[in-house]
Image (cartoon, grey):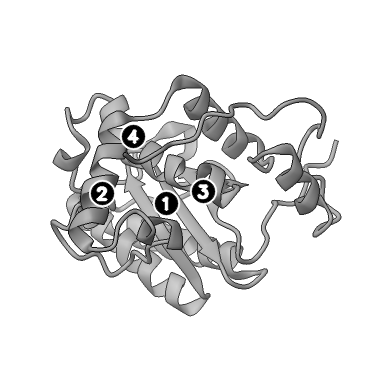
Amino acid sequence: MARLPRLTLPDFPHHVMARGNNRQAIFLSPSDRLKLLALLQEAAHKFDVAVHAYVLMDNHFHLLATPHTQAGLPSMMQAVGRSYVRYFNAAHQRTGTLWEGRYKSTLIQSDRYLLTCMVYIDLNPVRAGMVAQPQDYPWSSHLHYLGVRSDRLITPHALYWELGNTPFAREAAYAEMVQSGINTVQQTALTDATLQGWALGEPDFVAELQKRTERRVAKTTAGRPISTQKITVK
């Protein structure tokens, strides 16, 4: 069976993951991570993609991003992927492929999953046992949202701005969300949807989304959504 084209639509947030071939390390030094971030910043600006969150793990990375054109996200990922391989091979005196096929992605319902996805991304290093707290990991956008540093790659989504009327209120509300974490059902939903390439959201959202593209957006539109629990901020 021929694989489906990647599901990408403008002005919707997408959760993206790219990993090393055979799960090999894609970063061998801090300079490697800085290079990828610089390439992402350059390509995001060039192809009109708003990057809301990221984390750079050892053998893969995650992004939460909203493209503003149909070709924006795939063009950005292609440009970054090719440029980084050239850099990585030259820097580490190697040849051959680095990535495990094409990147994985899912389109998500903003009000249902966007903040959940940000928390999911920030907690990756904790789940992997790399750090005890997400703020201890320097290679993610989490410190930007805590107000510890300013990250030029990041464009906060409108839903983040709604967390509070001041920077301090937003930072405190988001920090509380990350500390509360996400449940196993939400984590599985985000992981599976990203790996399989199906849209993630409630049935009405998925049905409306299907009207915008000829590409199938879900395995089935029947049944209840994977989870009905929403993150709330006290």
- Asked whether residue 28 appears in the rendered view, the answer is no
**Dot 4 amino acid type:** Asn
Residue 120 spot, x, y in % from top left? 40, 37
Q: CA distance from mark 4 to mark 1?
A: 29 Å
Query: Which circle marks residue 16 in the picture?
Result: 3
Point 68% across, 38% down: residue? 202
Circle nearer the N terminus (1, 2): 1
**Dot 3 amino acid type:** Val
Query: Which circle marks residue 142 in the picture?
Result: 2
**Dot 2 amino acid type:** His
Query: Which circle marks residue 124 in the picture?
Result: 4
Q: As drawn, is 191 to the left or to the right of 176?
A: right
**Dot 1 amino acid type:** Thr
Q: Residue beneath label 1, please?
A: 95
Circle nearer the N terminus (3, 2): 3
Q: As drawn, is 174 to the left or to the right of 204?
A: left
3 and 1 marks in contact (CB < 8 Å):
no
Q: CA distance from mark 4 to mark 2?
A: 11 Å
Circle nearer the N terminus (3, 1): 3
Crowding near the residue tagged with mark 2, few <14, some 14–19, many ≥20 C-alpha atoms within 10 Å: many
How many numbered discs sit on the rendered protein?
A: 4
Point 32% across, 41% down: residue? 122
- Name the image quarter holding the C terminus: top left
